[in-house]
Amino acid sequence: MRDSTRWPPSVRIHPTARVHPEAAVGEEVTIGPFALVAAGAVIGAGTRVGARARIGPGVEVGEACLVDTGATLGWGDAVSGDRGPAVIVGRNVKVREYAVIQAGRDEPTRVGSGCYVMSRTFVGAGAWLGDGVVVTHGSVVEPGVRVGPHAVVGGFGLLSAGAEIGRRAMIGGLSVVAGAVPPFTLAHGAPASLRGLNLVGLRRAAVPPGTRQALSRAYRLLLRGDFPPEQAEALIGKEMRAMPEVEELAAFIRRHPEVRRNVVRASPEETDGEETSR
């Protein structure tokens, strides 16, 4: 590799890479063989761009990211650089081999800090991934989809246009989601249905037992159909005041009341949202 004369001395660009002189490249950036960086692209300090990766016009990549071999950010029906960013990628994001993040059209495609976009995935134009989202191998996030922070999309999943995934939700592998999945829940199937709380994810995130128990109670009240929605909301207000996670779940369901029709009743291999004092 060789030092570029156009960017900071710490930048390392392979001789076969093509980096447009109007691209902005930060300190300690490494750009691998046959990579392509277009005019108007911004690459943050400490980011590594792998062999044959492509970063299009108007793409902004944050600090300490990895754009791995053959990954493509931008291009296609890109928002031109003079109209604003086409893709905005936060800090410490990993975009693995041959993943594609499509350029936004009317608004940029956004990938939050700490996301992990695994190999051969597709993120469509104008999609929004919150901080810490994991999109697993071979999955498709169609244009305009919103995925809340720290949600996980299982392998070869499909989030259809118009889908909205709540915070810390888990979408099982090979699932097809065409609508809304509330925060903290687990959805699976083709088409996907709600199978309970994402208890494993909540425990891994060190959500306190009391909060998990309150979410379990709220899940049963709001989604299991034991009470009319108005009565369920009243019970939640009485029993679980000042519980932000419960209010987040309830507010999401108010915006998307149709999710109540998509709840699977518990079977031996499914969780119904129960959380004990363990």
Image: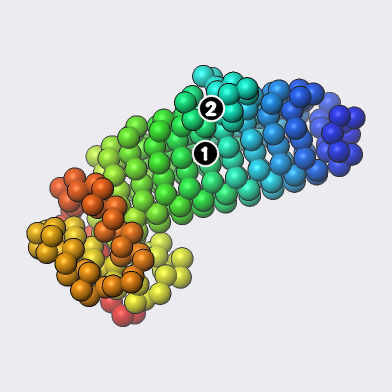
In the image, residue 226 above or below residue 61: below
Residue 97 quadrant: top right
Residue 82 placement (x, y as % from top left): 63, 22
Tell me if label 2 and label 1 are in contact, CB under 8 Å.
Answer: no
Q: Residue 145: in sight, yes or no?
A: yes
Residue 210 placement (x, y as % from top left): 34, 77
Q: Quadrant location of the N terminus?
A: top right
**Could you classify mark 2 by the number of other residues whose Cα lies within 10 Å: few (under 14), some (14-19), or many (20 or more)?**
many
In the image, residue 118 above or below residue 33: below
Does residue 243 appear left or right of residue 139 in this picture?
Answer: left
Between the C-alphas of marks 2 and 1, the distance is 9 Å
Q: Residue furthest bottom?
A: 277
Disc 1 marks which amino acid?
A: Arg
Residue 255 placement (x, y as % from top left): 26, 48
Q: Secondary structure at mark 2?
A: loop
Q: Residue 138: in sight, yes or no?
A: no
Query: Which mark is drawn over residue 110?
Result: 1
Most foreground residue, 100 or 212: 212
Q: Residue at x 46, y 52 (%)?
A: 149
Q: Quadrant location of the C terminus?
A: bottom left
Q: How many marks?
A: 2
Residue 275 placement (x, y as % from top left): 28, 72
In the image, residue 46 above or below residue 196: above
Q: Which residue is mark 2?
A: 103
Does residue 72 appear left or right of residue 176 in this picture?
Answer: right
